[in-house]
Amino acid sequence: MSTLRGRTIVVVGAEEPGARALARALAAEGAAVALLGVRAGPDAEFAIASIANELWALEVRHVMAPAGDSPDPYAQAERVRAELGEPDGLVSLAGDLTPWRDAFGCPAVDARDVPPETALRLLASLVG
């Protein structure tokens, strides 16, 4: 059984390259996925919506929150908690993860420079 099965994982910077592969890998592990944006704009929102559509097609529990909805980590944390429950872990593909770790209060992995498989192994070791 996967360590991430049944867990809720937050992906910060879901509009960034690599987010789609990471979301797919989390879905394959059986995790619910929160896709959070950090950049506003139509391209960023389209990227997040595209990943959310894939998760929907795979029947994966998920929520999407583009930065245009609210760039505040605490507001996004409340939205995730309301829709998916308390998050178990966070993976960041965008910048400083300190404000996100503080807002969500869960183990966090900076995945900007690592492949999705490595990020998942690191995350599983933290939430396991």
Image (cartoon, grey):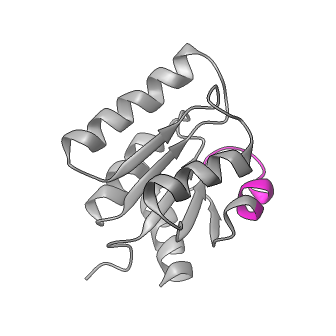
Q: Tell me the residue at 21%/49% (across/down).
A: 59
Q: Is residue 38 left or right of residue 36?
A: right
Residue 45 in the image: state x and y as whole percent.
52, 24
Q: Quadrant of residue 27?
A: bottom left
Residue 50 in the image: state x and y as whole percent.
36, 28
Q: Which residues are magenta?
A: 93-102
Q: Nearer the viewer, residue 109 or 32?
A: 32
Magenta stretch encompasses residue 100: yes
Q: Tell me the residue at 20%/40% (across/down).
A: 57
* 96, above or below 65, in the image: below
How many marks the image carries: the answer is 0
Residue 102 in the image: state x and y as whole percent.
77, 63
Q: Tell me the residue at 79%/55% (across/down).
A: 99
Q: Is residue 29 left or right of residue 120?
A: left
* 33, above or below 67, in the image: below
Can residue 117 be seen?
A: yes
Magenta stretch encompasses residue 117: no
* 101, above or below 43, in the image: below
Q: Nearer the viewer, residue 48 or 76?
A: 76
Can residue 112 be seen?
A: no
**Quadrant location of the N terminus in the rendered image:** bottom left
Q: Is residue 123 left or right of residue 117?
A: right
Q: Quadrant of residue 29?
A: bottom left
Q: Tell me the residue at 47%/39% (across/down).
A: 64
Residue 22 in the image: state x and y as whole percent.
42, 51
Q: Is residue 74 left or right of residue 50?
A: right
* Residue ranking furthest to the front: 82
